[in-house]
Image (cartoon, helix red, strand yellow):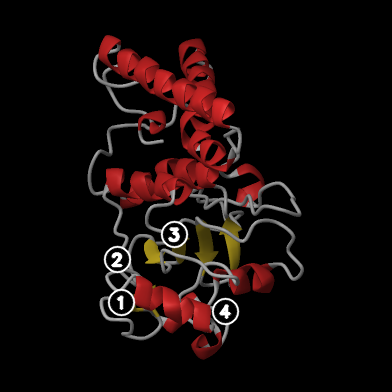
């Protein structure tokens, strides 16, 4: 998180493996992705810790996430993937089998099936909705030959029909700083992200501390469980598990000592991480 929101009108740095744009609420006519109510949709997977980051920020500020016309529409893909990745509509037999294996899974869909899924507005997609079924298609449409991970979260612009960002940290900061000021229905007085664009030295120091703590928790907690799951050596596995629980105890102590949150008596983004 390097204060990229609204840099170059939200264009974001060029990358072959990521989309790093940002919605921008500056009213100067230069925003590539202006902060317009109901313009964007965010694709997520329930249970994914990375998608949970911006989704949690949306919830914290009470920004509408289930409306086709207000706030930021959240679209839940089916919470299990097959060979072709995350999907809205099952195409292969393997994907059909997943639907039968998880009959109670809640997701959104282009049609009312499977049962419990919510029909979606066709304007959310770049072409005839009958041809859209996998998240990978949005990546390919936005950047043919895209070489990065075709994952979630993903923020889609329904007007320009392209991807704004697929950075979980960048999206979280963007929602908090660019959308919450005009779309929040609660907690408007709480700033989850300290600012680096200030002359206040204390605020700058707080920004650096917050940024470093986010990195630590990302490494020691969020991604650690994936590393533990993939290790094949028993001794290494046990060492990593011990480090993981030791880190949890350290952060728990920090929360208690600081008065309720990791960095004090009011929440920051790192508390949602």
**Relative image position of residue 66 (x, y in whole percent):** 29, 65
Q: Which residue is mark 2?
A: 66
Q: Which one is closest to the eye, mark 4 or mark 1?
A: 1
Q: CA distance from mark 1 to mark 3?
A: 14 Å
Q: Which residue was labeled with disc 3?
A: 44
Residue 143 position in % (x across, y down): 71, 67
Q: Earlier in the sequence, mark 3 or mark 4?
A: 3
The quarter of the picture where the C terminus appears is top left
Q: At 60% from the left edge and 72% from the top edge, which residue is drawn?
A: 84
Q: Is residue 132 visible to us here?
A: yes
Q: Residue at x 38, y 62 (%)?
A: 74
Q: Of label 2 and label 3, which has the lower sequence position? A: 3
Number of residues whose C-alpha sits closer than 10 Å to that of mark 2, classed few (under 14), some (14–19) or many (20 or more):
some
Do labels 2 and 4 touch, CB within 8 Å? no
> Which SS class for mark 2?
loop
Tell me how far mark 3 sits from mark 4, CA to CA. Answer: 18 Å
Q: Earlier in the sequence, mark 2 or mark 4?
A: 2
Residue at the farthest front position: 234
C-alpha span from label 2 to label 1: 10 Å
Q: How many marks?
A: 4
C-alpha gap between disc 2 and disc 3: 13 Å
Question: Between disc 1 and disc 3, whose residue precedes?
Answer: 3
Q: CA distance from mark 4 to mark 1?
A: 19 Å
Would you name the residue on which mark 4 appears?
A: 126
Q: Which mark is residue 118?
A: 1
Looking at the rendered image, the disc whose residue lies closer to the viewer, 3 or 4, is 3
């Amino acid at each position: 998180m390097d204060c990229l929101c609204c840099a170059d009108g939200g264009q974001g740095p060029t990358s072959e493996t990521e989309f790093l744009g940002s919605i921008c609420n500056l009213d100067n006519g230069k925003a590539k992705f202006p902060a317009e109510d109901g313009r964007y949709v965010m694709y997520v997977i329930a249970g994914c810790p990375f998608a949970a980051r911006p989704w949690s920020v949306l919830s914290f500020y009470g920004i509408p996430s289930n409306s086709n016309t207000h706030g930021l529409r959240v679209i839940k893909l089916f919470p299990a993937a097959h060979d072709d990745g995350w999907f809205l509509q099952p195409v292969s037999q393997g994907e059909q089998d997943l639907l039968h294996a998880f009959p109670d899974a809640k997701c959104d869909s282009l049609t009312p099936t499977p049962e419990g899924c919510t029909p979606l507005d066709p304007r959310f997609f770049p072409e005839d909705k009958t041809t859209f079924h996998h998240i990978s298609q949005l990546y390919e449409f936005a950047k043919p030959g895209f070489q990065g991970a075709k994952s979630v979260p993903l923020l889609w612009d329904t007007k320009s029909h392209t991807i704004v960002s697929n950075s979980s940290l960048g999206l979280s900061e963007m929602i908090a700083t660019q959308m919450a000021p005009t779309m929040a229905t609660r907690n408007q007085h709480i700033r989850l992200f300290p600012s680096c664009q200030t002359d206040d030295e204390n605020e700058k120091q707080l920004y650096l501390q917050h940024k470093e703590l986010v990195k630590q928790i990302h490494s020691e907690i969020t991604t650690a469980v994936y590393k533990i799951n993939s290790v094949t050596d028993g001794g290494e596995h046990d060492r990593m598990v011990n480090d993981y629980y030791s880190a949890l105890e350290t952060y728990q102590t920090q929360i208690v000592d600081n008065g309720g949150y990791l960095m004090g008596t009011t929440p920051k983004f790192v508390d949602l991480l």
